Amino acid sequence: MGAAAVAAFEVMRMRSTRLAQDPWAVITHAVELSLIYESRAEGLLCSTGQARKSAGSEVHDAQRFSDREAEIVNYHPAFHSFDNLDHLHEPPKRENVDGEPTNALFALDAAVEFFVAVGWPQATARLALEYIAARLMRCGDRAIAYVSLRREEAGPAMLDIEHSAWLAVLRAVLGNQRCDYEQTSAGIGILGRLLSGENPDDLCADHALADAVQAAAPAIPVEEVAADV
């Protein structure tokens, strides 16, 4: 309101205002413009004078990284690149060996089986995967679920693992959210790979994935901790 008061005072000093048919209308209009440009300056993170000069331009307000839950690389077109893959043939779809439909429940059970195969206690593995899957269902998007889960402390505390191990589990289950991993196995994540028809044996054959999940395993199973309590 300080800029508006100054604008009103400056306009009242002008001779044209005193000679106008409706001086108060002139003052009101000047104050209105001053408030508009002051608000525009706050959005552009610049001075009011610069905001006046940019009037009519299509420059949008400045956006901070913290204004969005998803990382900027996931939604800003400047960070997206598209390769010409017309010369490549689509790989054949992998069939389910057991002949059963692979849905989310089967994928979750298969993910638990994989975690157990690389050294996780079964109860701990199911607790971790169901916790992540529940957040994924609520968010409806892997990137948003990843950002939501990586910031909280309840997950690693519940599993009794370090935060770095928790992040490794999230990257393994939901996929690496960097755009250059988008079409890779690391970017799809365990759940996505299982839903596409892979099985726990295929995941175990991915040594980098198996080593990362194994290294993140808790030292004490959850059921043992509960028994001690």
Image (cartoon, grey):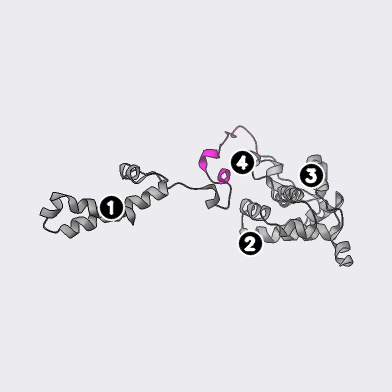
Mark 2 vs 3, N-terminal side: 2
Give the residue at mark 2: 138
Give the residue at mark 3: 212
Q: Is residue 79 magenta?
A: yes
Of circles 4 and 3, the one toward us is: 3
Mark 1 vs 2, N-terminal side: 1
Mark 1 vs 3, N-terminal side: 1
**Element on which disc 2 rests:** helix
Q: CA distance from mark 2 to mark 4?
A: 23 Å
The amino acid sitting under disc 1 is Val
Q: How many marks?
A: 4
**Mark identifier at residue 6:** 1
Range of the magenta residues? 70-90
Q: Position of residue 141 (x, y in %)?
A: 62, 54
Q: CA distance from mark 1 to mark 4?
A: 49 Å
Magenta part mainly helix, strand or loop? loop
The amino acid sitting under disc 2 is Arg
Relative placement, left or right, of 180 versus 168 is: left
Mark 1 vs 4, N-terminal side: 1
Q: Position of residue 104 (x, y in %)?
A: 71, 58
Q: Residue at x 83, y 47 (%)?
A: 214
Decide which of 135, 56 is in the foreground and name it.
56
The amino acid sitting under disc 3 is Ala
Decide which of 112, 61 is in the foreground and name it.
61
